[in-house]
Image: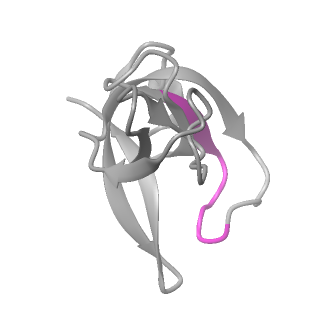
């Protein structure tokens, strides 16, 4: 679920109380969770709890709208990750929390 402008239908992330486009109301709506890797880094230090380095943090552009991007762990071998690679969202359990992460599409 991501924030969406009621007036224009444009997606807003991170979410805001009012639309950045019109100042009008917003609502939350389900997204497909499909996208492509816009950018990424390979982390070689233990910074994310529950992740053993090396792991990938990616900036994923979702299919719903150009420029609609979200940061998340990409659960894949760092050597297999490429700019433009297709990914899909899944929700992972981590220390009693549910977090978004992406996996490479086959």
In-front residue for pair 77/33 = 33
Q: Quadrant of the C terminus?
A: top left
In-front residue for pair 50/87 = 87
| 58 in magenta | yes
Left or right, 70 with respect to 54, comes to left
Residue 60: x and y in percent read 49, 30
Q: Which residues are magenta?
A: 49-60
**Can see residue 1?**
no
Above/below status of 30 relative to 69: below
**Can see residue 70?**
yes
In this rendering, the count of numbered labels is: 0
Residue 88: x and y in percent read 29, 38
The residue at the point 56 percent across, 29 percent down is 22
Above/below status of 52 relative to 41: below
Q: How is the image coloured?
A: one colour
Name the image quarter holding residue 98: bottom left
The residue at the point 28 percent across, 42 percent down is 31
Above/below status of 52 relative to 20: below
| 24 in magenta | no
In-front residue for pair 97/28 = 28
Residue 25: x and y in percent read 47, 47
The residue at the point 59 percent across, 71 percent down is 50
In-front residue for pair 27/64 = 27
Residue 92: x and y in percent read 38, 66
Left or right, 23 with respect to 41, comes to left
The residue at the point 47 percent across, 23 percent down is 37
Left or right, 32 with respect to 97, comes to left
Residue at the limit of the structure toward the bottom, as seen here: 96
């Amino acid at each position: 679920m991501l924030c969406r402008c009621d007036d224009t239908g444009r997606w807003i992330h991170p979410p805001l109380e009012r639309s950045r486009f019109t100042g009008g109301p917003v609502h939350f709506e389900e997204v497909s969770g499909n996208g492509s890797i816009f950018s990424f880094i390979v982390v070689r230090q233990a910074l994310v709890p529950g992740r053993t380095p090396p792991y990938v943090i990616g900036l994923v552009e979702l299919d719903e709208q150009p420029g609609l991007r979200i940061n998340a762990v990409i659960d894949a071998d760092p050597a297999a990750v490429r700019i433009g690679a297709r990914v899909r969202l899944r929700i992972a359990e981590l220390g009693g929390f549910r977090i978004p992460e992406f996996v490479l599409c086959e």
